[in-house]
Amino acid sequence: MKQFPAATLAALWAAVLGWGIFQHRLPLLAWGLAVALNAATFIAYWVDKRAARANRWRVKENTLHLFGLAGGWPAARLAQQVLRHKTVKPGFQAMYWLTVWMHLAALGAYVFWDRIKPLLNS
């Protein structure tokens, strides 16, 4: 199965987030929180990469996935590519992509719930 490019998904994510704010389904604060969460996610990957090189305490993979699931997955992907970190572990990548799709599904369902709900009731 061919994966969607992460940049395309990130653009879709930003558009849905923006639409949710525009439609007042999400507060404007959501944009700032998303930026802060993505910055924290990138930093977590950077800290883990440095710790791996120094053979020190590592950030748990579940923590990295939780950052992604919460909405930091665009920065997680950027960090993976820029830092060349966690890119060759198939199990990690599978879970990463699962968190991406779960986050996008939850965000889309929340933002478009008024349009989805009638379809479920028919």
Image: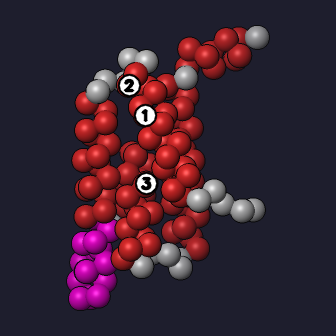
Residue lying furthest bottom: 54
SS of the residue under disc 3? helix
Q: Which residue is mark 2?
A: 21
Q: Main secondary structure of the magenta part?
A: helix
Choose top left, top right, bottom left or bottom right for residue 25: top left
Q: Is residue 82 magenta?
A: no
Q: Which residue is mark 1?
A: 17
Number of on-image labels: 3
Distance of mark 3 from mark 2, alpha carbons?
Answer: 19 Å
What amino acid does circle 1 point to? Answer: Leu
Residue 120 horizontal/vertical position (percent): 70, 17
Q: Which residue is mark 3?
A: 73
Mark 3 and mark 2 residues within 8 Å of each other at the beta carbon: no
Quadrant position of the C terminus in the picture: top right
* Callout in the foreground (3, 1): 1
- Which residue is located at x 42 percent, y 79 percent? 84
